[in-house]
Image (cartoon, rainbow, N blue to C red):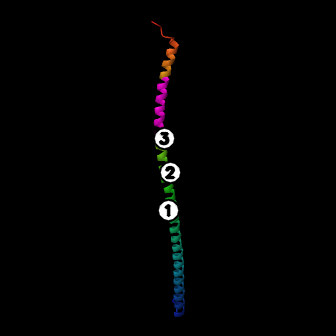
Amino acid sequence: MTMGPVEIERKVRQLDSDVQAIYEMLAAIEGTQRRHSHRFQELTEQIDRKFAAVDSKMDTLDFRMNTLDGKFVALDGKFASLDSKVASLDSKMDAVLELLRSGPPASA
């Protein structure tokens, strides 16, 4: 079936209209993608700021934990020293008790 000039012109107009509609849809899609890209950028910046804040807090906690660790090491040393002194006192008390139990020294 052969198309006449009127049908061909109608078909060309319809194709031109379809092409224009496609360009409008592509422009709308491009606008949506642009808005999404801007929003993703905003969200990325927010997340980066939050991670930076968390990282800073973790650094602070790490410093505090290291400080506490140093204090615990110092306390451990003091407890070891105290334990040594108590052990020395214990042996001295045992010696005193042994002397008391043995009675007065014999006079010569």
The span from disc 2 to disc 3 (Cα, nearest Å) is 16 Å
Q: Earlier in the sequence, mark 1 or mark 3?
A: 1
Residue displayed at 49% across by 47% down = 65
Local secondary structure at mark 3: helix
Q: Nearer the viewer, mark 2 or mark 3?
A: 3
Q: Which mark is residue 61?
A: 2
Residue displayed at 46% across by 25% down = 88
User: Foreground residue, 50 or 26?
Assistant: 50
Residue labelled with disc 3: 72
Instruction: Give the extent of the magenta segment.
Output: 73-90
Local secondary structure at mark 1: helix
Task: Give the x, y percent position of residue 31.
Answer: 53, 76
User: Foreground residue, 86 or 42?
Assistant: 86
The span from disc 1 to disc 2 (Cα, nearest Å) is 20 Å
Local secondary structure at mark 2: helix
The span from disc 1 to disc 3 (Cα, nearest Å) is 35 Å
Q: Amino acid at mark 1?
A: Asp
Task: Give the x, y percent position of residue 14.
Answer: 54, 86
Task: Give the x, y percent position of residue 45.
Answer: 50, 65
Q: Residue furthest front?
A: 108
Q: Amino acid at mark 3?
A: Phe
Q: Nearer the viewer, mark 1 or mark 3?
A: 3
Q: Which mark is residue 92?
A: none
Q: Amino acid at mark 2?
A: Leu
Residue labelled with disc 1: 48
